[in-house]
């Protein structure tokens, strides 16, 4: 993972001159006046952890698994939001951890937490480092130091229960390796978010991730049937059965808690048969409103494909729906929808059927032709025009490319960032307008693009991409706009996050969303599980 950008550095590329010219003419973007620093130029604070504490940590996990070198500290500083990357490219490593600790077992994690609680050392659980909401930056005030707890050594597929169709997996498994290991048993998780190449299973659970095939497979939190969690107070082992009426479900307390309540050390996950066939296609609608109505009908009445997403007019015009071929649809009108289908080749129950949805092809057997015909009847009846497989296949090829495009835009001098929300179908138009109006009010004349990224029977998620000319202080420029748009989302009745999480960036808006009593409940849980407050301080829960 590139320390100052996204993913494999070899995949980053410079924007072609026609796109750079368009940015200059349309948005006033100019090449940056200063270059991005090299990793050896990042300014790091001195390590503040007392030597005796480092000695205890080395005794707990092994001396080779406690690192205080500059390279390790830089690579565990912050996440991958645009402000994170701008600070790193400017050489600002002020929020680096003092040490990186790599436990090898649940017992190791418990011992590290015991040591850190005893010495008032903050602990930031670290998976793939892909947070885009400030989820990896601890508030070190009042602590003797900060440790990044890298779970990369906890990377095993522990067991597969083929009869129950579950698998026990460790949290440090990156998603591509998890899929390869499950494929040997004929299974898949079906979880493919944009961060798929680098994110970990533990991170998916801690942030309530949602993948691009959520219409067929559901969100990641839908897949979690059990977990083991290490806390400063001891171990939580949760999930005895698929469903239970034995009181509140404590799994839901940990899911989405972003490391503030405990460290997930094992996950028991629902798996599906690996598909024998996949197919993708594109559809065009005259307007975002018309396309949204078509998606709503599929979500509420079925049949649901595995992938279902819709770009608005601006995103379609720019071609961001196909980030690997930016500009490819620039001459087209209307809105592009991407529809994907899968089939396992075996008979079985229909797919997620989530939130009143009509079921999917996943696991139904018999090929995908019949489902495509039924979906096509709904989409064409709603005014859609089938564009054939090419747009869908283009999207599938480039589905993980958008973060690399962001790196290229940053290098060209633009400020570019994403944000997302969700709401009920009846309130979605108001939410869409509120976000766009807020961004234009804060940033002048930015390019604002949007797509429906996930659908449910009762509502959907909206995912926005914003590009604008960079100001003299681009971090402050975006933070001002983000505060305003967060307020607008809450006022319009949306949630502050559908799948990115809360972190530090959404903390105050989340508090407004759940109310004062809701915040008190979270503080009560935090106080019981983490009395010294060492776990990811400053994340999720507003300070007193």
Image: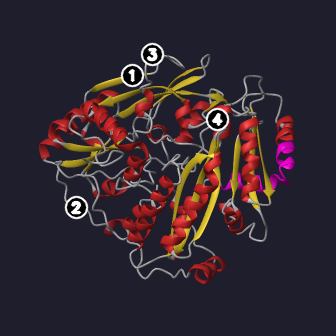
Q: Main secondary structure of the magenta part?
A: helix
Q: Is residue 11 visible?
A: no
Query: How far is mark 4 from mark 2, CA to CA?
Result: 44 Å
Q: Which mark is residue 137?
A: none
Q: Is residue 505 magenta?
A: no
- Mark 2 vs mark 3, foreground winner is 3
Q: Is residue 120 visible?
A: yes
- Mark 4 vs mark 2, foreground winner is 4
**With 439 as the anchor, is 349 left or right in this view?**
right
Q: Which residues are magenta?
A: 376-398
- Mark 1 vs mark 2, foreground winner is 1
Query: Mark 4 sits on what residue?
Result: 217
Q: Which mark is residue 246?
A: 3
Place of residue 35 in the rendered image (x, y in percent of width and height, measured from the top left): 42, 77
**With 11 as the anchor, is 295 left or right in this view?**
right
Judged from the image, the secondary structure of the residue bearing numbered disc 2 is loop
């Amino acid at each position: 993972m590139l320390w100052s950008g996204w993913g494999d550095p070899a995949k980053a590329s410079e924007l072609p001159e026609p796109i750079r010219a368009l940015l200059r003419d349309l948005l006033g973007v100019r090449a940056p006046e200063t270059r991005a620093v090299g990793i050896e130029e990042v300014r790091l604070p001195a390590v503040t952890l007392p030597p005796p504490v480092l000695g205890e940590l080395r005794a707990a996990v092994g001396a080779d698994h406690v690192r205080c070198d500059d390279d390790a500290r830089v690579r565990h500083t912050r996440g991958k939001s645009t402000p994170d990357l701008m600070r790193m490219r400017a050489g600002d490593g002020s929020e680096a951890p003092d040490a990186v600790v790599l436990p090898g077992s649940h017992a190791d994690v418990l011992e590290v937490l015991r040591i850190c609680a005893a010495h008032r050392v903050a602990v930031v659980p670290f998976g793939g480092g892909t947070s885009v909401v400030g989820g990896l930056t601890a508030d070190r005030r009042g602590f003797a130091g900060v440790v990044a707890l890298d779970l990369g050594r906890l990377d095993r597929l522990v067991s597969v229960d083929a009869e129950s169709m579950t698998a026990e997996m460790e949290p440090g498994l990156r998603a591509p390796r998890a899929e390869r290991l499950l494929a040997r048993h004929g299974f898949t998780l079906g979880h493919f978010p944009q961060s798929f190449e680098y994110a970990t299973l533990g991170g998916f659970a801690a942030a309530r991730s949602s993948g691009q095939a959520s219409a067929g497979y559901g969100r990641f939190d839908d897949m979690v049937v059990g977990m083991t969690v290490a806390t400063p107070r001891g171990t939580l082992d949760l999930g005895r059965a698929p469903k239970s009426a034995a009181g509140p479900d404590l799994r839901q307390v940990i899911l989405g808690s972003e490391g503030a309540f405990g460290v997930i050390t094992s996950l028991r996950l629902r798996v599906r048969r690996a598909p024998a066939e996949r197919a993708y296609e594109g559809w065009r609608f005259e307007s975002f409103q018309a396309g949204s109505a078509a998606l709503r009908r599929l979500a509420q009445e079925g049949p649901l494909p595995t992938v279902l997403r819709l770009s608005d007019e601006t995103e379609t015009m720019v071609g961001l729906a196909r980030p690997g071929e930016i500009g490819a649809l620039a001459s087209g009108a209307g809105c592009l929808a991407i529809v994907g289908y899968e089939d396992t080749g075996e008979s079985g129950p229909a797919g997620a059927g989530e939130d009143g949805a009509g079921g999917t092809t996943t696991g139904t057997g018999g090929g995908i032709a019949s489902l495509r015909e039924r979906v096509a009847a709904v989409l064409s009846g709603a005014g859609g025009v089938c564009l054939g497989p090419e747009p869908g296949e283009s999207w599938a090829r480039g589905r993980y490319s958008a973060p690399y495009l962001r790196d290229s835009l940053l290098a060209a001098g633009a400020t570019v960032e994403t944000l997302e929300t969700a709401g009920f179908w009846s309130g979605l138009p108001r939410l869409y307008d509120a976000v766009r109006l807020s961004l234009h009010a804060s940033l002048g004349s930015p390019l604002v693009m949007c797509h429906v990224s996930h659908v449910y029977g009762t509502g959907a998620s909206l995912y926005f991409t914003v590009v604008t000319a960079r100001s003299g202080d681009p971090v402050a420029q975006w933070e001002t706009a983000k505060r305003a748009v967060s307020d607008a989302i809450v006022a319009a009745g949306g949630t502050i996050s559908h799948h990115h999480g809360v972190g530090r960036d959404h903390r105050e808006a989340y508090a407004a969303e759940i109310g004062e009593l809701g915040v008190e409940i979270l503080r009560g849980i935090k106080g019981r599980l983490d009395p010294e407050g060492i776990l990811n301080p400053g994340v999720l829960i507003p300070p007193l």
